[in-house]
């Protein structure tokens, strides 16, 4: 590369503005301010002032006299800045002529002109975007018992969120230290550079305690989720109350169907990131499953293939790619493979090899084994997952569905019910699982109720379950009307019976559904 002398100041500023428009900088005030500051100081011949203390006070808003040796904020954000630049030059800026770098060991930027035949080296594992969450200390009255409870609650929430592979979690120690500076939420979010902040308050009376929690989007300061828990004050003495609140909070906000990823999916990554090569697996997963179509499937499949190609050690990427193949098989989409299920299993095994605690992998593999009718393998994997003692109830629902389909009705029902009670945002096939359960238990009104909640997301299975339930309720007129729709979709009786037998492993359940359908034919 050529030296600074060949790059004009105007070119550098024009290039800087282009970098600042890149999503990773656009969504981070700290990274943008850091980069602008070091470039401005260097171009104005003040690079000698680019020390940790100066950047801390001028960019991060540290108080005068702070000790950089005891506070690693500048070093942490400098590392993030180098990764963000790396990401930019490996994607949108891959063909840019000007190149800005922050060499390790210094905060003075380098400016050079890239040769067209010079490939920029980058670490693919660092370019996968994950939302960052910080748990800030709750506001509590001056009561040492409540203060201790609040600290324990926040620390546990932080620890449990760390088990979600799809999130980056700032340590509670860092958040606690930041809170000691008595900053407002906006400033705390900037300094921690958190995408989301979880905080709350505790109030108490003589006998009751009220715990409020809220999740705030840092950039807009918008509250996107909140909940209140009221309990008897006597419950503060043990861990049961803390465990119960933590379990609810982490599953409401984290996981593949938590509020963080529901909010992310609203941004429609297909439009917002037109040229993106890699995007966090769970954003794609949620975006795909909420309204799956052939076009979205093909786009998502391509993105996830590229993700694991760029970062072969991304366990969540392999898990989501595996489940994408399962979805393609189920919906009959073109996966470009003769056996998508075998590919899904290979992806799942790869994910487990990288990270045995990757929750999503267990759901992907269980579903693949289910469609291959490998009941024993499916049940063994469910046993493995339960031994992890996971608090990810979204995955619990997926495992519960697979258990019901395998004929483990009561065990699966418990997991599925717990899942949807904690977080009512889930996939349509959870409703199908509950309908299967009630049909197997001869509770046909309940089976019909859950079949209706599928709401056309899999019209064939919705109609099969509604018809079978109506027949057993002796509502033959209604069953015939539903059967007319099903005949239009699947006119051949043999094909319809093959669908009923396609993945359900309980002979009695399959027989019951087939008998009901034959009665109405």
Image (tube, rainbow, N blue to C red):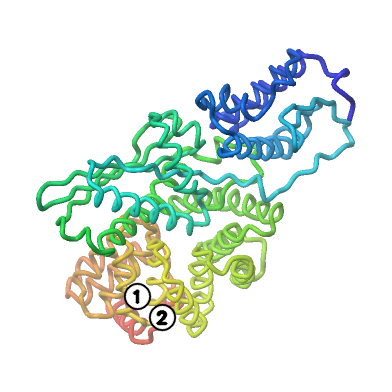
The picture places residue 15, in percent across and down from the top left corner, at: 72, 22
The residue wearing badge 2 is 406
Report which quarter residue 350 is drawn in: bottom right
N-terminal label among 1 and 2: 2
The residue under the point 12% across, 46% down is 205
The residue under the point 38% across, 87% down is 507
Looking at the image, which is closer to me, 348 or 443?
Answer: 348
Judge the density around disc 2: few (<14), some (14-19), many (≥20) Cα neighbours within 10 Å: many
Q: At numbered mark 1, what does the secondary structure look like: helix, strand or loop? A: helix
The picture places residue 428, in percent across and down from the top left corner, at: 37, 60
Q: Are marks 1 and 2 in contact (CB under 8 Å)?
A: yes
Report which quarter residue 320 is drawn in: bottom right
The picture places residue 69, in percent across and down from the top left corner, at: 60, 38
Residue 86's label in the rendered image is none
Looking at the image, which is closer to me, 475 or 4?
Answer: 4
Q: Is residue 434 left or right of residue 342?
A: left
- Mark 1 vs mark 2: give the one in front: 1
The residue wearing badge 1 is 412
Q: Is residue 377 left or right of residue 453?
A: right
> Looking at the image, is 153 positioned above or below residue 463?
above
């Amino acid at each position: 590369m050529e030296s600074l002398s060949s790059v004009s100041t105007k070119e550098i500023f024009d290039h800087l503005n282009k970098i600042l428009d890149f999503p990773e900088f656009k969504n981070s005030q700290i990274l943008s301010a850091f980069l602008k500051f070091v470039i401005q100081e260097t171009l104005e011949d003040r690079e000698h002032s680019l020390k940790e203390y100066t950047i801390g006070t001028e960019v991060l808003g540290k108080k005068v006299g702070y000790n950089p040796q005891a506070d690693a904020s500048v070093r942490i954000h400098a590392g993030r800045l180098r990764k963000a630049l790396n990401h930019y030059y490996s994607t949108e800026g891959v063909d840019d002529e000007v190149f800005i770098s922050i060499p390790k060991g210094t905060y003075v930027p380098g400016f050079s002109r890239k040769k067209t035949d010079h490939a920029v080296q980058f670490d693919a594992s660092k370019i996968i975007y994950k939302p960052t969450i910080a748990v800030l200390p709750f506001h509590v009255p001056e009561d040492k018992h409540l203060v201790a409870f609040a600290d324990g609650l926040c620390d546990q929430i932080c620890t449990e969120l760390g088990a979600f592979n799809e999130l980056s979690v700032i340590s509670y120690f860092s958040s606690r230290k930041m809170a000691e500076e008595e900053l407002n939420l906006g400033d705390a979010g900037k300094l921690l550079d958190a995408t989301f902040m979880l905080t709350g308050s505790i109030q108490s009376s003589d006998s009751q305690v009220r715990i409020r929690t809220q999740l705030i989007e840092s950039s807009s300061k918008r509250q996107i989720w909140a909940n209140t828990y009221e309990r008897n004050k006597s419950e503060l003495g043990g861990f049961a109350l803390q465990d119960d609140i933590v379990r609810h909070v982490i599953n409401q906000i984290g996981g593949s169907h938590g509020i963080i990823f529901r909010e992310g999916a609203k941004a429609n990554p297909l439009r917002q990131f037109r040229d993106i090569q890699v995007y966090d697996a769970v954003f794609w997963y949620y975006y795909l499953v909420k309204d799956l179509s052939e076009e979205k499937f093909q786009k998502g499949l391509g993105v996830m293939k590229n993700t694991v190609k760029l970062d072969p050690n991304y366990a969540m990427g392999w898990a989501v790619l595996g489940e994408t193949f399962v979805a393609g098989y189920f919906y009959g989409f073109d996966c470009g493979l003769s056996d998508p299920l075998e590919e899904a299993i290979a992806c799942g095994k790869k994910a487990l090899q990288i990270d045995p605690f990757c929750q999503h992998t267990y759901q992907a593999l269980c579903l693949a084994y289910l469609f291959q009718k490998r009941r024993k393998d499916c049940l063994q994997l469910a046993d493995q997952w339960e031994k992890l003692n996971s608090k990810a109830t979204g995955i619990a629902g997926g495992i519960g569905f697979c258990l019901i389909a395998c004929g483990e009705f009561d065990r699966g029902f418990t997991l599925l019910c717990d899942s949807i009670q904690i977080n009512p945002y889930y996939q349509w096939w959870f409703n199908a699982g509950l309908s299967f359960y009630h049909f197997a238990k001869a509770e046909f009104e309940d089976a019909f109720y859950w079949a209706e909640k599928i709401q056309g997301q899999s019209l064939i299975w919705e109609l099969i379950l509604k018809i079978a339930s109506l027949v057993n309720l002796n509502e033959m007129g209604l069953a015939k009307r539903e059967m007319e729709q099903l005949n239009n979709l699947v006119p051949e009786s043999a094909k319809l019976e093959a669908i009923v037998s396609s993945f359900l492993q309980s002979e009695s359940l399959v027989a019951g559904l087939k008998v009901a359908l034959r009665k109405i034919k």
